[in-house]
Amino acid sequence: MISDRIDAITKITEKYLGPILPAPKSVKIELTANCNFKCGFCVKSLRPDNGEMNRDLYSRLIREIREAGVEELGVFFIGESFTCKWLPLAIKEAKDVGFPYVFLTTNGSAATPSNVEACMQAGLDSLKFSMNYYSAEQFGEVARVDEKLWQRAISNLKAAHRVRHTGGYKCGLYASSIAFDGEQGKKMESIVADIRPFVDEHYWLPLYGMGGAAKNIGWKPSPGNPGRVGALRDPLPCWSAFTEGHVTHDGKLAACCFGTGIDGSLLMADLNEVSFMEGWNSLSYQALRKAHLNKDVSKTACATCAAG
């Protein structure tokens, strides 16, 4: 199940407790930084980068990443990959290169039945829908786009289940939701109950800080990225800098699953200039990991996030 894979990434084993590391267990690579939502809690509200990855750069990087020993490839990062027209081609190429597990997370609104089937035909192993709103009205207020997209996302999730069954595809279907407290948390329960029959597993996530974005709309997030509810991790050391790589659409390697930092301070290397493994063990990365291992990130770009 997807929760087992998540827990394997967020748990830092002895092998990864150091400043210089073997290849990460997983890498997310951003085909596009474009997104059709404008969520106030997302880092894109702080640094709204746009643009798509160069196809030749993608081809080079996935080969380097696979040759380094990475087995799990996420064809997304901050942007919404279903807005990228060559998404199915990217998935097929990743499978042809030899990745055993290619996964994707979506907000659902552009994951139409035809788009989903094209990705499943290409060999997609896992598709997860992020379902974080309890009503069209709340969606409109926070996502700041047409309220109709809320119902469209739910309909697309249910349709994905039908597409998989009809086509006999082996792609896993999952959903996650933020575990809000109070009244909003109770309201989310009804949405989850509606979609749960259409996915293999649903899981809850704590409210992340997303690099400070959540605070900008008055939400009180958890420090760091503690993983999923039920297997929460300590904020320090943060697994994100040790077990998973994050590549932006313009070829930069970021230390954080929430992005590059408002000022780019979480960028560890430029993969247009160095290989993936050179970037993964760059001097910048080593210094940041040492701070995490010492559990003192006060003088790093992670200070605010780790403090909550």
Image: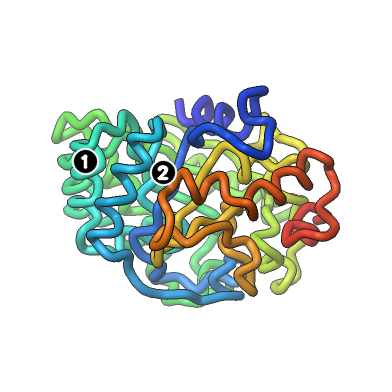
Q: Please say if the residues under marks 1 and 2 sit with CB atoms less than 8 Å apart.
A: no
Residue 162 in the image, given as x and y percentages of width and height = 23, 39
Question: On the picture, is 279 further left or further right than 186?
Answer: left
Residue 135 in the image, given as x and y percentages of width and height = 53, 62
Query: How many angstroms separate mark 1 from mark 2 (CA)?
Result: 13 Å
| Image quarter of residue 151 | bottom left
- Bin the neighbour count of mark 1 within 10 Å (Cα to Cα): few under 14, some 14-19, many 20 and up: many
The correct choice, above or below, for 127 with respect to 40 in the image is above
Closest to the observer, 111 or 153: 111
| Image quarter of residue 64 | top left
Which comes before the other along the chain, label 1 or label 2? 1
Number of the label disc, if any, that sits on residue 241? none
Q: Residue at x 70, y 43 (%)?
A: 238
Number of the label disc, if any, that sits on residue 128? 2
Under tag 2, what secondary structure? Answer: strand
Closest to the observer, 304 or 281: 281
Q: Residue at x 74, y 64 (%)?
A: 219
> Can residue 20 be spotted in the picture?
yes
Residue 202 in the image, given as x and y percentages of width and height = 50, 36
Number of the label disc, if any, that sits on residue 120? 1
Under tag 1, what secondary structure? Answer: helix
Q: Quadrant of the N terminus?
A: top left
> Can residue 199 be spotted in the picture?
no
The correct choice, above or below, for 141 with respect to 233 in the image is below
- Bin the neighbour count of mark 2 within 10 Å (Cα to Cα): few under 14, some 14-19, many 20 and up: many
Q: Residue at x 67, y 23 (%)?
A: 14
Name the amino acid, label 2: Lys
Name the amino acid, label 1: Met
Give the number of callouts.
2
Residue 88 in the image, given as x and y percentages of width and height = 20, 51
Question: On the picture, is 62 further left or further right than 292?
Answer: left
